[in-house]
Amino acid sequence: MWGFSRESLSVAGVFHPDYTSRATTVFPAALSENTPFVYAPESLPEILKTPAVFKAEQGWSPQRAEYLGRLKAALDEDVVPPEGSLILLDRYPLEDLAKGRGQYAGLGQAEITEQLAVLKRVLCAAEAPVTVVTEFRKVGMSSGFATANGPLFHYCFGGYIELRGHEVVEHFHSRAQAAAAAGIPLADWFG
């Protein structure tokens, strides 16, 4: 009557309550496989956030400062993502940042400009990953990270849910392809 599907997918999962410790192991482990990945962050890629943006989004604490330091150290390793990798950026947080509204309302123009410059320098110049700006809601996309074989990591409740199951990973990748097809390259968004 309501049009809900009765179909469901079987998955196995683990919850990692402290994203600051788990997140810095997820990406290196996936990159060590040297297989393409799809990364759809809630806002911006964690590793590319400036301290000002990180603070605007998540507040500040000694643990978060340490986490940001680990992210910056990982960025300095200059790891090359595998060809065929995809980063999807949701248009709305990106526009909020550019216009200094929402959670970014407290940022100064110099801080906004710095963050946008980092995104442009790192993501627009690289051949991999391809970075696309899209509207997550229009195509049923959610944030997450997965290689072709999984697992799928989804940020929630201040941590990460790690989902295993071929069908759910495949579903994430198909949503990502739909989101990419409906979007525009980040370089075009910058115009």
Image (cartoon, rainbow, N blue to C red):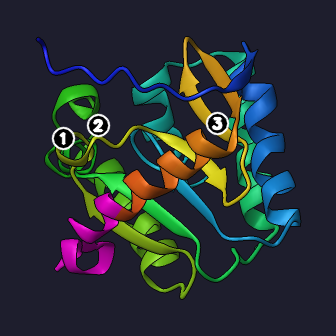
Residue for point 77% across, 72% down: 79
Q: Is residue 151 above or below residue 15?
A: below
Q: Tell me: 81 left or right of 98.
A: right
Identify which residue, 49 or 137, lies in the foreground. 137
Q: Tell me if residue 185 is in the magenta stretch.
A: yes
Magenta highlight range = 178-191
Return the residue at label 2.
107
Q: Tell me if residue 190 is in the magenta stretch.
A: yes
Q: Hey, what amino acid is under mark 3?
A: Phe
Q: Quadrant of residue 48?
A: bottom right
Camera-nearest label, 2 or 3: 3
Asked if the residue under mark 1 is in contact with the one under mark 3, i.e. CB atoms within 8 Å, the reply is: no
Q: Hey, what amino acid is under mark 1?
A: Gly
Residue 40 seen: no
Q: Position of residue 52 (x, y in %)?
A: 45, 39
Q: CA distance from mark 3 to mark 1?
A: 29 Å
Residue for point 55% across, 11% down: 157
Return the residue at label 3.
153
Q: Say few, some or many: other residues with alpha carbon within 10 Å of mark 1 (under 14 / 14 to 19 / 20 or more).
A: some
Identify which residue, 61 or 37, lies in the foreground. 37
Q: Tell me: 174 left or right of 22.
A: left
Marking on residue 100: 1
Quadrant of the frame with the N terminus: top left
Find numbered disc 2 in the image and state the secondary structure of the residue it sits on: loop
Q: Is residue 117 above or below residue 8?
A: below
Camera-nearest label, 3 or 1: 3
First-in-chain label (1 vs 2): 1
First-in-chain label (2 vs 3): 2
Q: Say few, some or many: other residues with alpha carbon within 10 Å of mark 2 (under 14 / 14 to 19 / 20 or more).
A: some
Q: Hey, what amino acid is under mark 2?
A: Leu
Please name the predominant secondary structure of the magenta segment in the image: helix
